[in-house]
Amino acid sequence: MPKISGVFGLEPEQAVAFLRQKKMLAGKVDKKQLYQSALARATTISQMSSLEMTKDIYQSLEDAMREGKSFQQWKKELVSEFERKGWVYGHDKKISRGIDGKLLADPKTGEHFGTPRRLNTIYRVNMQTAYAAGRYQRMMENIDARPYWQYSAVGDERTRPAHLGLNGRIYRYDDPFWTTFYPPNGFNCRCTVIALDERNLKRKGIESVGSSDGLLQQVKRAKDKQGNQEETVGFTLADGRVLVTDKGFDYNVGRLTYKPNLDLYPEKLAYQFAKAEMSGAEFKLKFAQVGQQIVQFKQDLGGEGKLSAEQMVAVRDNLTMNFKFAAGRLSEGTQRLIDSKTATVWLSDDTLIKQFNSREGQDFGVEMYADLPVVVFQPDHILQTKEHTDRFIFIKDGLAVVFKRLNIEKEIFLLSFRKISKKELRKLMEKENVLR
């Protein structure tokens, strides 16, 4: 069995960071919250609710990735650690006389985990997704040189038909296709993405790269054993067939950890990046998906109008995928004015969900977000709230942005983006601390 470093190349720091993130999440949230959240599919192990065991597995995966351990070495050391903690309670010789026959359970709860054979799937899926997340980060850092991405399937007898149907598709990095179909798209998926430049396209005889607009559609999967039917995004082929990912893989794992640090770029270049982000196809797709899902959720509840606080908790737990968009960049002058060491303003999909509910019935569509980076970069008025000194209000051309500065994490997150009247502006300037 080759070592991880031999399979994935040199140690990918982003991949290690991805595994570390999952281990930390598993350690700091309670079980109820974890299983209610859509993010659980990225932080839990199937049929295993022991957060302590989950955390240990992800810690060991992080170490294995960093140290280049083989699968067999990783499994042997992990099972030894399980034995030390009393999580090995017997041996089933019918399964194996060796390590794979050992039976694992949480001594605190009695929860039966199975045998180490399951670790093979856990190992491969997590190494696979960690590698994909790291590769996404590196490709995003090089989009100026190679902005076109090509889906590449292995194409042998083990390649799934759905994955083979996507082979060779070329779209820009910001095409909504990659929001759903950036690999891995299933357990043990071996597909990858190849970054291309203009010269590569010419060699392939491609004059221009198309768009996936019109090819992506909301579809429903087949019902599971409990009768539940999950919605997902499908890709339509020329012959009418609609391809979907395996269940639980219809999201871009790289996007979960990608953070374009606009602080590292000249302010005007970063400002242009934020404008492209907020008017890009990926953001528009996410905006549409959140809107459709909230409408569906309301229909399921049989109600109309704004959701209650309790209902919003359920909606956010089910829809939030930890996506973040670089919504704006503070100018250097604004940074000094509000005493901020960081300049990037983030818009999370969780905030987007809350905005849909608070703006019920208002004319505030996705096109308004194209102006968000302008308000952040060139505000006419800057106010600091008296009640919360870490919150600021930026106002320009009848639009208001409210964001919170997180001193500990050194990040700025958008809390609200809305229209504002002249009358309300006057009241705010009388009520809050006016910095500009």
Image (cartoon, grey):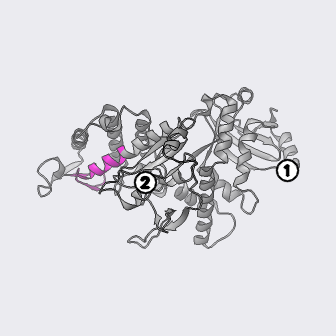
Q: Secondary structure at mark 1?
A: loop
Camera-nearest residue between 60 and 232 = 232
Q: Residue at x 74, y 27 (%)?
A: 333
Q: Which range is magenta? A: 103-127
Q: Amino acid at mark 2?
A: Asn
- Judge left or right: residue 60 versus residue 104: right
Compared with 155, 329 (above or below) is: above
**Which residue in the protein does label 1 denote?**
421
The quadrant in which the C terminus is found is: top right
Q: Closer to us: mark 2 or mark 1?
A: 2
- Taking the magenta stretch, the answer to whether it contains residue 119 is yes
Q: Quadrant of residue 304?
A: bottom right
The quadrant in which the N terminus is found is: top left
Compared with 127, 227 (above or below) is: below
Residue 233 seen in this snapshot: no
The circle on residue 167 is 2
Location of residue 6 in the rendering, given as x and y in whole percent from the top left corner: 30, 35
The circle on residue 23 is none
Camera-nearest residue between 15 and 423 = 15
Residue 236 seen in this snapshot: yes
Location of residue 265 in the rendering, given as x and y in whole percent from the top left corner: 62, 29
Camera-nearest residue between 350 and 141 = 141
